[in-house]
Structure formats: C-alpha cells, structure tokens
Image (spheres, rainbow, N blue to C red):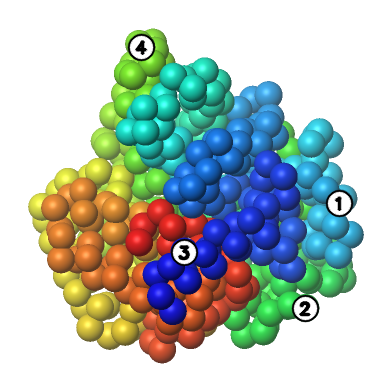
Amino acid sequence: MTIETLDAGARAILTANDRGGYTVPNGRVYPFQWNWDSAFVALGFDTWDRDRAWKEVETLFNAQWDDGFLPHIVFWQDDPGYFPGPSVWATGKTPVTSGITQPPVAATVVRKLWDSAIAADADDAYRLRLESLFDKLIAWHRWFRDYRDPDGRGVVVAMHPWETGRDNSPEWDIPGEPIDISNVGEYVRRDTGHLDAKMRPTKLEYDRYLALVQYGVAQGWDHAKITAGNPFKVADIGMSMILLRANRDLLHLADYLGRDEEAAEIRAMIATAEAGIDWLWDEEKHSWCSRDLLTGRSSGFITSASFLSFYAGLADPAKDAAMLAHLHRIGSKVEYLMPSLDPEDPGFQMIRYWRGPVWAVVNYMIGTGLAEAGFDAEAARVRHDTLALMERNGFYEAYSPVDGSGSGGDDFSWTAAIWLAWR
C-alpha cells in the first residue's frame, strides 16, 4: 500500500468510528469511549482536523467525576450486547461510566495538541480550551496521588488489571490468585463472539476481572475504601512511567499558563516519583518490572511497558544500558519490536493480547522516549517496525512480533491514529 492509500485509510477509520465528539476503538467489539484510546485518537485527528482532536479529549473529560477520577469507559449510548455493560458496573453516574481508570496519557497528548496549535499560530483560538482542560487534568493527577499511591512512593498502584490498559499481562497472574471468583456467576463475553478466543484473555482471567468489578460495586465505588481493602494491588510499571511523563508535560503547561501554585504542586509529584520509582527496578532481571504491593514481590516479567523508562524521562546510565541490552536481545529474537512480553519467556504467545503481540501505541511511547534520550538507532528501529506492520496488514488492534500478522480487531482507531501522527 502507498503512503497516500494508508493515510486515506487511517482517516477513513477514524471517521467511521466517530460517534459525534468521541471515537470508539472498534465498533463491533468496543462500542463506547475508552479513556486512553481517545487520547491517542486525538493525535490522529490533529493531523487534519484540529478542532475535532480537542473535542475528543474534551468529551472524555465531560465524564470526569467530582473527585477528579476519570473512568476507563464512558457509556454515552446504550449497547445491550456489550459485557460488562453499565448495569454490571453500577456506578450511578451521569453520564454512565465504569468505576476504574486507565493510563494517564491525556496530559501528554494535550501538550502535543497545544504545541501543534502554537506551531500553526492557532494558540489564541485554543487558549481558553487549554485552561479548562488543565484544571481537569491536574484534578485527575491529584486523584492518582491520593487514591493510587497508598505508600507515597510516586508510583501508580492498579486496583484492576484493566486499569493498566494491558489487561491480561502475566504480571497480574500471581497477584490475581487470591481473588475470590466463586460468586461471579454465568456471563456471555462480547469479545470472543467477534474475535478468535486464542487472541483473548482466558475465562479464568475474565472471572477475576469481574470479581474485582463486583468488589468495587460492593464498596459503592468509594475509591478510598477500594484502595484500603482491594484484593488486587499491583504497582504497575507502565502506568507509573506514563504518569511521570504526564506530570512533566502538565508542568510545562502550568508554566506556560502562569499557574505557579499548581506548578509547584506538580514539581512535588515529579520529585516524589523520581525518588521512589526505583522500587520498581528488579536487580535480578536488570529491568523495570511491576511489583505486587501486597507481597512486595517483583513480577520479574520484562514487558513492553518496561521500556517506558525513557519516555518517563528517567536518565540512569546503568539502568539505561541494561534496558538497551534487553531491547537488542529481544530485537534479535523477533521480526518486529516491541513484543508485549519477552519472547524468551516461557509464557510468550505471539497473538494472545498482552502476552506477546506488538501494540502501536506502546511502541509510539517507547520510540518517542528513546529518541528524546538520544538513542536514535533504537528509536528508528521501533518506529520502522511499527509502521512496517501497518503497511503490511493495515490497522489492527495489535500484531504478531514474529510474522507480523494482525491480532485482535481490525480497523482500529488508535492504530490508525498512530500511523497519522508518527509516519
């Protein structure tokens, strides 16, 4: 396919998945607005429709709760075929939402949108919109500080695997074992009705997901209660790195807007993270890894999220060298970087969701971080592989790192957006 054909195809996907102010990831499998999906989608829209890009993020934040929480799903329209739907979440909010969040990429995206507006001499038209979003973004970041970092380390502790965006990563297997699934009951999944089950999480994993949703309902979605007693608490390396990066970008916006008090607050959050995030370094694996808060044990898994340290702006020569060594080793084992799980891990599965496939959005963050850190050759490899997968197969949810075949849903919004934003 030519560049022009791919450009047109990517725009067509975003247009087809547009529901009027928000974009669904894929209409057949994911018929609502997803949090971090929409942030990345805005980058795609910004390449040809700046106003629509801003609207995507603004619509998402229209579902923000009063305490700053931003849900991972907003059910703007009913779709009775989707499970788990609004009645299962039972948050009692208007608009109807889920009760968990997702990786906080929005501040970084808003900075990109703002920089784009400045470059186009359109900043005057978007200044008030930026100020409004800034207030909502910092409220969400405060929520992470207050409800997802119980030990004050500056890391993000996920209370549900879905919060991480990497739903069935093996990082959650052992921490998920104590979850009581005896009362989950019978249910019908939508994902396996549209996609090959070998690409999706297993029933055991899904039972655990639903049990945690039931726990949240039982707590009335009181996040303080959930933080105190949730049976699943994992400090996620992905969310922790993404939030650190997002706080750096939010600080940039605070300084630009002259919000000195908020800037000081954000600097304190950054300092806390820079001082505490080493807790997620696994000396045995020589890698950044997630860690179970309840047991203190490192997951020991090297995943694509482990390479987000560069994106987070952490500069440690020894740790950087170790991660680059892993990158080169993994790059010699697969055709396309970056698999979501180390291909030398015995649990590696090249097309099962977050246990092997390549995800364009994660590659975008990894490649961006490597480039900013001055590792140009590695950044170029990640970017080249990502775009080559799209050129070969179109815009799938994910791809096999071994043979490049598409995995998950096709005509996928955030993959199309990354093509437009990064090619």
Front disc: 1 or 3: 3
User: Which residue is identified by label 3?
Assistant: 7
Residue 216 point in image, percent of width and height: 73, 45
Dot 4, how many residues are within 10 Å of its Cα: few (below 14), some (14-19), or many (20+)?
few
| Residue at 67%, 60% in the rendered image | 16
Dot 1, how many residues are within 10 Å of its Cα: few (below 14), some (14-19), or many (20+)?
few
Marks 1 and 3, how far apart at CA: 31 Å
User: Which residue is identified by label 4?
Assistant: 258
Judge whether 66 appears above or below 19 on screen: above
User: Which residue is identified by label 2?
Assistant: 193
Dot 3, how many residues are within 10 Å of its Cα: few (below 14), some (14-19), or many (20+)?
some
Confirm or deny contact between disc 4 and disc 3 (CB under 8 A). no
| Residue at 36%, 47% in the rendered image | 241
| Mark 1 vs 3, N-terminal side | 3
The residue type indicated by label 1 comes to Asp
Front disc: 2 or 3: 3
| Residue at 68%, 41% in the rendered image | 21
User: Which residue is identified by label 1?
Assistant: 78
The residue type indicated by label 3 comes to Asp
User: Which image quadrant for residue 300?
Assistant: bottom left
Judge whether 148 appears above or below 378 on screen: above
Image quadrant containing the C terminus: bottom left
Seen from the viewer's position, the closer of residues 13 and 197 is 13
Seen from the viewer's position, the closer of residues 333 and 409 is 409
Judge whether 331 appears above or below 144 on screen: below
Dot 2, how many residues are within 10 Å of its Cα: few (below 14), some (14-19), or many (20+)?
few
Confirm or deny contact between disc 1 and disc 3 (CB under 8 A). no
